[in-house]
Image (cartoon, rainbow, N blue to C red):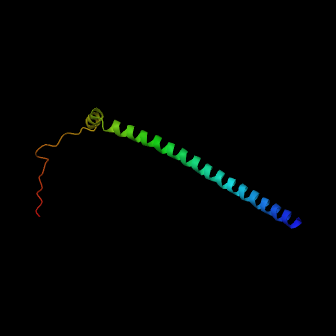
Amino acid sequence: MNKLNIMLFVLVVLSALGVVSVQDSSRESFIVLEKEHQRQADLEEEYRRLQWQQAKLANHSFIKEAAQQQQLQPPTMQNTKIVRLQY
């Protein structure tokens, strides 16, 4: 009976150590998951900001105003050259 109690005690201790190990691993995984969720939220925010910036830069009036500030002119026929590719 004494050997059985010692064996059961050892099994209980090993089981408790296993539970603690699994809980620690689970906690570490949860911390990594939370960090990745935050990173995902940051990337989504940056993506929305870049989309807004792209829409702003693609706005016709913005392009027209920038062209006027830089004194850009549409190309004329004298500035245009046609290049024919021969296969």
Observer-nearest of 59 and 29: 29
On the rendered image, what quadrant is the N terminus found in?
bottom right
Task: Answer left or right for 35 relative to 10.
Answer: left
Residue 15 in the image, given as x and y percentages of width and height:
74, 59
Observer-nearest of 64 and 18: 18
Observer-nearest of 14 and 68: 14
Taking the spot 76% from the left edge, 61% from the top edge, the residue there is: 14
Farthest residue, direction right: 2
Residue 63 in the image, given as x and y percentages of width and height:
28, 37
Residue 56 in the image, given as x and y percentages of width and height:
34, 36
Observer-nearest of 79 and 39: 39
On the rendered image, what quadrant is the C terminus found in?
bottom left
Taking the spot 54% from the left edge, 49% from the top edge, the residue there is: 36
Taking the spot 84% from the left edge, 65% from the top edge, the residue there is: 4
Task: Answer left or right for 45 relative to 29.
Answer: left
Task: Answer left or right for 33 relative to 7.
Answer: left
Residue 57 in the image, given as x and y percentages of width and height:
33, 38
85 versus 48 height, above or below: below
